[in-house]
Image (tube, rainbow, N blue to C red):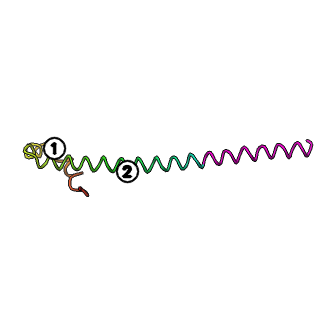
Amino acid sequence: MEPALELELLRSENQHLRARVRDLEHRTESLRIDADTMRHERNLAAQDLRWTIDRLDQSPAGPLLRRTDGFRRLRAQWAGRGSS
C-alpha cells in the first residue's frame, strides 16, 4: 500500500473514532441526567405515598383501614419515614 494512501486512511479512521468518542460522551451525559431525573421522580413518588398513607391513617376511616393486613403492611413500610 502506498504511504500517502495509508496515511489518508489512518486520518479518516482517526476522525471517525474521535466522532464516536464524542457521541458516546454525549450519550453518557444524557444517561446521567436521565438517572438523576428518575431518582428525583422516585423520591417524589415515595413522598406522595407516605403523605397519602398518613392522611388515610388520620382520616375517619383510619381505624377501619388499620384492621386490614395490606394497610398495616403499607403503614409499617412507608408511614413516617422522612415524611414532610
* Disc number placed over residue 27 in the picture, else none: none
Label 1: few (<14), some (14–19) or many (≥20) C-alpha neighbours in 10 Å: few
- Give the quadrant of residue 6: top right
Q: Residue at x 62, y 45 (%)?
A: 23
Mark 2 falls on what kind of element?
Answer: helix
Q: CA separation, marks 1 and 2?
A: 30 Å
Q: Is 68 on the left or on the right of 40, as rendered?
A: left
Within the magenta stretch, is there residue 7? yes
Q: Residue at x 71, y 46 (%)?
A: 17
Q: Is 73 on the left or on the right of 6, as rendered?
A: left
Q: Is 53 on the left or on the right of 7, as rendered?
A: left
**In front of the other: 79 or 14:** 14
Q: Quadrant of the N terminus?
A: top right
Q: Which residue is mark 2?
A: 40
Q: Please, what is the three-letter code of the amino acid marked with disc 1?
A: Asp
Within the magenta stretch, is there residue 74? no
Q: Which residue is mark 1?
A: 69
- In percent of width and height, residue 40 lies at 37, 50
Determine the residue located farthest toward the bottom in the rendered image.
82
Nearest to the eye among marks 1 and 2: give it: 2
Highlighted range, magenta? 1-24
Mark 1 falls on what kind of element?
Answer: helix
- In percent of width and height, residue 76 lies at 20, 52
Q: Residue at x 12, y 43 (%)?
A: 65
Among the two numbered marks 1 and 2 on one chain, the one whose residue lies closer to the N terminus = 2
- In percent of width and height, residue 34 lies at 46, 46
